[in-house]
Amino acid sequence: MIQCRRRCLKYPVKTLISLAFITAKRVFLYRFDRLPVEGFASGSLSGGPLELITQGGSLQALAPSDIKALCFISEGGKADLFTSDPLFQRRPKLPGLWARFTFRDGEKLDGILPHNLIDWPEQGYLLVPPKASSSRQRVFIPRSALADTECLGVVGRPSPGGTKRPSRAGITPGEQLPMFDSQQ
């Protein structure tokens, strides 16, 4: 245990808490003008500055307008979010809204957004990208990075009781149209 006077712990406690928070978010940071950077992110996704500690140990403070996308990862790999399969090849199976995002520089990215609109952050979108893996689990896209957003489909969840079909027992012979000449 470190012992010191009371006033020396007044501000460093806040710093220690934020350092512990940094190790929980390993990311690839994509910017418009530079190569992707791997590091650990700290800060809020709700409009405040985002701090990034790179693998080299440098600290960068970034405004949301400088960020193109923030890809959350669990282990290192290649930063290939926009180069390897940025779009779904066929209809996805995950439940949610299938959306296509067009960025200011013209690049496109597909993703699955949650059905519940309350889960969407106010400053951007948190989505599951195509071919999600340990090197691309979730992606945060700030609204300021987008030029266009398009909803391509709604992939639903099965209802808890299953779908109810009309029963055939309730149909009388006069209500159903004849299909073949022999039924007339």
Image (tube, helix red, strand yellow):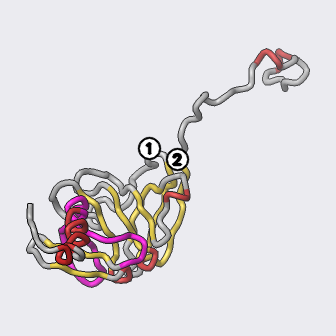
Residues marked 1 and 2 touching at CB (< 8 Å): yes
Give residue 175's position: percent from left, percent from top.
88, 24
Give residue 27's position: percent from left, percent from top.
24, 64
Q: Secondary structure at mark 2?
A: strand
Give residue 174's position: percent from left, percent from top.
91, 20
Amino acid of disc 2: Val
Q: Which residue is mark 1?
A: 93
Q: Is residue 164 above or below residue 57?
A: above
Residue 59 left/right relative to 144 = left
Q: Which residues are magenta?
A: 21-48
Q: Secondary structure at mark 1?
A: loop
Position of the C terminus, as image quadrant, is top right
Q: Residue at x 83, y 20 (%)?
A: 171
Q: Any mark on residue 125, and which?
A: none
Residue 19 lies within the magenta run: no
The residues bearing labels 1 and 2 have C-alpha atoms spaced at a distance of 7 Å
Give residue 23's position: percent from left, percent from top.
20, 61
Amino acid of disc 1: Lys
Q: Is residue 55 above or below residue 134?
A: below
Residue 171 left/right relative to 125 = right
Q: Nearer the viewer, residue 167 or 90?
A: 167
Q: Is there any visible trace of residue 128 in the rendered image?
A: yes
Q: Nearer the viewer, residue 12 or 60?
A: 12
Residue 33 lies within the magenta run: yes
Dot placed on the residue nearer the N-terminal end, 1 or 2: 1
Q: Any mark on residue 155, and which?
A: 2
Image quarter of residue 47? bottom left
Q: Is residue 162 above or below residue 105?
A: above
Q: Is residue 54 above or below residue 165?
A: below
Q: Residue at x 41, y 73 (%)?
A: 142
Q: Residue at x 42, y 72 (%)?
A: 46
